[in-house]
Structure formats: C-alpha cells, structure tokens
Image: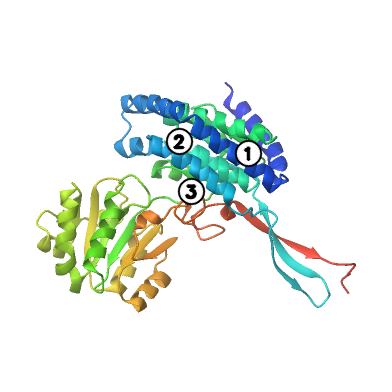
C-alpha cells in the first residue's frame, strides 16, 4: 500500500462527505445514530470476541497494564458504548443554531450561527469505545471524521466501523462520513496530521508520547491535553468521611484514566485528623504513597516524594501527598505542578470552595466530588471526543458544541452602508 496515496484518497473522500453531512437534517442524523446503537447491541458478542483477540495479541506484545485496561471491552462496556450513541441522538442538534441576534442602528440584525468544523481527524490508542463515541459526536455535529485507532485495537475498531457504516446506510448517508484508517502503518499518522487541505482539526487521544509527537509535527490545529495530573485538596473544613470516600474513588476506581487523582494535598491543621485513615485505605488497596516530610511523620508506609513525583501522571497505584499550609498554598501547588486537567476541593466552607473554583487554572474544577466525574458521559454530553486543556475554542470534555464553531450572520431588508 502506498500510504501517501491512500491517505490522500481518504482525505478527499472525507472532504466530499463533510459537505453532505453538514447539510443533513437532524432527523436523518438521529436515525443513523439509533441504527448504530442498535447494531452495537446486536453484535455485542462479536465485538467482545474481536476485542479478546486484540487483548491476546497486546499481551503477547508486552503492552503495559494501563494500556491493557484501556483496551479491554466488557459486556457492560459494549452496553455503555451503545448508550452513549443513543444519548448523542437525544441531545439537541447544535448545527444551525442562531444566537445573540441584535438590531444595529442601521436596521440590520447581527448574530451568530453554529456550524460544523468540517473534517476531524481523531488519533487514539487502545480505546475501542472511542471509535463509536467519535463517530457519534462527529456525525451529530455535522462533521466528517477520519479515525486512526491504535494497532492494538485494530480488530475491534474494524468491527465497530462496520456497524457505523451500517447505520449510515440505513439513514441514506455516505459511508465516507466516518472512515477508519485501515492500516497500522504509523506513516498514516504522519500524513493525516499534515493534510491541511482536507483536515480541519486533529483530536489526539493517547499517551504523552503520541501527543508530544503530534504537537511537534502536526500542521493541522489540535484539540488536546498532554496528561492528567489531577489533584484532590482536603481543606481544614473537610468532612472526614466525605474526604475518605472522594479520595478512594478519585484514586482507586481505575488507575489508567486521565481523570484519576495522582496528587493529594492536605491542609496542615487537618492532616492528623484526615490523613492516617485515608493512608490506611490507600495502602490497604496496594497504593504506594510518596509524600513530603510531614506526610512521612504521619504515615509510616510512605516513602519520600521527589520534585518529579508532584508533577507526574502515574497511571498506576501510586499517589503523591503533600501537606500544605492552607488554601493559598494548595492553589499555588496545583497551578505549578498540575496539568490543568481536573482538580477538586473537599470542604464545608463555601467561601474557600468558591475561591478554589475561581483561582485554580484547570479545565474542570470541582467541589466535594470525585475527579472521576470529569468525563463527557458524566457531564451529560452523551460521550466525549476528548479532553482539552487548551484555553481557546474548547476546554474540558469536548462534546457536540466543542466540535462546532460560530460564524457571524447578518439579516437585512435592503440596507446599504452610508
């Protein structure tokens, strides 16, 4: 296969299909989505079988545990995938929405209309559910998509793509609206991220290595986040039971996700009250604690944290712990060491909680809730195409609205400028 020739053809087909999907009405798009969801449910056994083959090959290739966790697809995972597609179908269609119409002294009306971005390239590792999530979100938002999944999930991705094309055909939409790159050759990624004439935006979903490469090489704008060093801060006004529950869920529900807590900060005046039972829970679950000197004095199982530990996304049963003077130091620490992804404060003090919301510079900031809620599905977006820690265009979980932009529109009845 000539990769350059192949990718040029994929790009040309996507650009042509983007025009067809941009003008499709909401009913047609929703019919396609409902058909896709039904097909996913119908073929649950086949999808799990394809995923099992991917997992066996990935284990044989020595894929690390965090990646295997992302790759695995259970019966519940298939059901959640179908539910996510159905939720996207149920969401309001943003395309064509007109807002902010105002009359000007000249008599014209000026406003904004929401429109698709065009062609979206999605590059992802290990996660087969992204194939369905990305297809659904791009379809509903009126965009064509070029999906390049990791080689470790190729069998499952192909199976999901076939079901997506089935749903598109049922609704009378071109198959090229959603294309899965059918090669594991990494040169395809190099082509995709430089095809400015065909691709309007790239969305990477993967580890630091992938995203660092794309940041260095892409000629197409990106919606991305580099890593997820998420923090839980336990204020001196934190409820002890709530603090333990939130830390437990934020850190131990899953270790390989970008919204898993990697750092725990504790107010000094509450450390003796809050930290020992939380440390006991963490060590009981096999989590390694790397802490500051004050943490070591309170937690015998802890080891000394390095400067790098406070800036690390571990994706493993490891957590950094630091005892801080209070809210000011906690905010300073998060803004210095964090990755601007997701942070939460546990506190019964309203004033402090509001300060935390305002001053922490992250895409998702929470009060008295687990960091694991930083997810498009949990935010009511139906699914997400990724998380953005950028500040321009889209920030946080990116759903339908994040896959559109706005253009200015003017309504007149014959006005001319004097």
Residue located beneath label 2 in the image: 128
Q: Judging from the image, what secondary structure is the residue with disc 1 in?
A: helix
Who's the residue at 14% across and 61% down the image? 276
Residue located beneath label 3 in the image: 386
| In this view, the mark in front (1 or 3) | 1
Q: Quadrant of the C terminus?
A: bottom right
Do the CB atoms of the residues marked 2 and 1 lie less than 8 Å apart?
Answer: no
Q: Judging from the image, what secondary structure is the residue with disc 2 in?
A: loop
| In this view, the mark in front (2 or 3) | 2
Mark 1–mark 3 distance (CA, rounded to whole Å): 22 Å
Pointer 1 or 3: first along the chain: 1
Taking 185 as reference, is 100 above or below it? below
Provide residue 30's location: percent of width, then percent of height: 63, 44
- Dividing the picture into quadrants, the one containing residue 171 is top right
Between 286 and 73, the one lying in front of the other is 73
Mark 2–mark 1 distance (CA, rounded to whole Å): 20 Å
């Amino acid at each position: 296969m000539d990769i350059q020739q192949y990718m040029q053809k994929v790009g040309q087909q996507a650009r042509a299909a983007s025009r067809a999907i941009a003008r499709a009405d909401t009913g047609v798009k929703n019919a396609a989505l409902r058909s896709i969801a039904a097909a996913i449910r119908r073929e649950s056994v086949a999808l799990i079988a394809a995923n099992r083959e991917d997992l066996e090959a990935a284990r044989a290739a020595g894929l690390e545990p965090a990646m295997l966790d992302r790759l695995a697809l259970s019966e519940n995972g298939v059901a959640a995938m179908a539910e996510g597609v159905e939720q996207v179908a149920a969401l309001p269609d943003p395309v064509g929405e007109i807002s902010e119409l105002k009359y000007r002294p000249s008599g014209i009306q000026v406003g904004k209309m929401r429109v698709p971005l065009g062609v979206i390239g999605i590059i992802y590792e290990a996660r087969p559910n992204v194939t369905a999530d990305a297809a659904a979100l791009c379809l509903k938002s009126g965009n064509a998509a070029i999906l390049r999944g990791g080689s470790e999930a190729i069998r499952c991705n192909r199976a999901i793509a076939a079901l997506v094309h089935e749903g598109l055909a049922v609704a009378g939409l071109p198959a090229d609206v959603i294309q899965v790159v059918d090669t594991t050759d990494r040169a395809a990624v190099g082509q995709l991220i430089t095809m400015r004439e065909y691709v309007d935006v790239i969305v990477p979903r993967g580890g630091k290595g992938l995203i660092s490469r794309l940041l260095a090489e892409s000629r197409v704008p990106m919606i991305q986040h580099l890593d997820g060093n998420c923090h839980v801060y336990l204020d001196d006004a934190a409820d002890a039971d709530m603090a333990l529950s939130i830390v437990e869920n934020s850190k131990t529900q899953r270790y390989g996700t970008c919204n898993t807590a990697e750092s725990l900060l504790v107010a000094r005046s509450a450390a003796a009250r809050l930290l020992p039972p939380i440390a006991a829970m963490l060590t009981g679950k096999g989590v390694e604690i790397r802490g500051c000197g004050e943490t070591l004095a309170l937690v015998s199982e802890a080891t000394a944290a390095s400067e790098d530990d406070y800036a690390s996304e571990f994706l493993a049963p490891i957590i950094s712990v630091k005892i801080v003077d209070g809210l000011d130091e906690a905010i300073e620490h998060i803004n210095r060491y964090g990755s601007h992804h997701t942070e939460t404060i546990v506190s019964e003090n309203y004033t402090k909680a509001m300060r935390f919301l305002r001053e922490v510079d992250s895409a998702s900031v929470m009060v008295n809730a687990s960091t694991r809620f930083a997810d498009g599905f949990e935010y009511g977006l139906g699914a997400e195409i990724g998380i953005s820690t950028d500040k321009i265009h889209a920030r946080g979980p990116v759903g339908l609205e994040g896959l559109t932009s706005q253009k200015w529109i003017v309504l007149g009845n014959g006005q001319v400028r004097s």
